[in-house]
Amino acid sequence: MRIRHKPWAKPEIAASPFCMDNAFALRGNWRQQFARPEQPFYVELGCGKGGWVSQAAASRPENNYLALDIKDEMLGMAKRKTEAKFREIGREPDNVRLSILNIERISEVLTPEDGVDRIYINFCNPWPKPSHKKRRLTHPRQLIQYQPILHGELHFKTDDDDLFHESLVYFKDCGWEILFQTEDLHADEPSDNIRTEHEQMFTEEGKKIKFLIAKPPVGEAVLPEQYAPKNHAEEQEEDGETLSE
Ligand SMILES: C[S@@+](CC[C@H](N)C(=O)[O-])C[C@H]1O[C@@H](n2cnc3c(N)ncnc32)[C@H](O)[C@@H]1O
């Protein structure tokens, strides 16, 4: 998604007590960054403008939330939204942390010791071109990174049919168990569902929201052969295409 440059985002993130600008240095010590380290630890990947995490953290003080996004502009907006939400309820944001991260590097930032209880992937980019599918946050190259750090479930929502169906294949190929799936979450919307910005937008466009809950297998994470990186030159060429999109 193209987004207008926001010169205020970087300095605001740097000055915020709940935005962590040293994600790599906190590897293995994430729980200690929260007022109540013993609480369940939930991580949202690609949080965008922060609509979901701000509502979740404000309404569920019994959980700790870390929201990650690759873009300063997005994290800046998530920071402002979180501040506004907590100001509204008159509470300190002591159970939420935000950080800039390319999720492709998540295993450099979160470890099994961090004990992630749940991962949320809400409306990640669908990357429809075959050479770009490896960028999907549900691609097997990502799933094998989540497996060692995740103790509980992964919750995934999308409006995109192809991404949803192909993700079901990714999860199964990597040995994950699908605990629940629906192709129309709002047909019987759970009372605890928190709508994200994209969820609201796609719903207003008449698109059905697809949702699944998956659980990783126990044991060593192994990338199925069909998803293995190709040779270096081909990968670089594809990366070049991705960046110039
Ligand atoms: C389509 S938006 C969805 C935002 C929000 N989750 C929602 O549902 O409204 C996808 C978000 O994922 C972020 N993103 C895409 N690729 C990423 C990556 N590799 N690492 C971290 N964030 C990423 C984008 O910057 C963007 O904010």
Image (cartoon, rainbow, N blue to C red):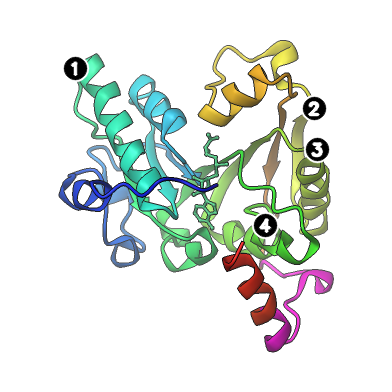
- Left or right side of 240 for 48: left
Segment tinted magenta in the rendering: 221-235
Q: Earlier in the sequence, mark 3 or mark 2?
A: 3
In 3D space, how far apart are the residues under numbered discs 1 and 3 (Cα atoms)? 40 Å
Instruction: Please name the residue that numbered disc 2 is placed on.
Output: 183
Residue shown at 26% from the left, 24% from the top: 84
- Left or right side of 159 for 66: left
- Left or right side of 91 for 149: right
The label nearer to you, 4 versus 1, is 1
Labels in figure, total? 4
When the figure is inspected, residue 52 is found, relative to residue 32, above or below; the finding is above
- Identify which residue, 74 or 213, lies in the foreground: 74
Q: What residue type is labelled 4?
A: Val
Q: Earlier in the sequence, mark 1 or mark 3?
A: 1
Q: Which mark, by number, is residue 218?
A: 4
Numbered disc 4: secondary structure: loop
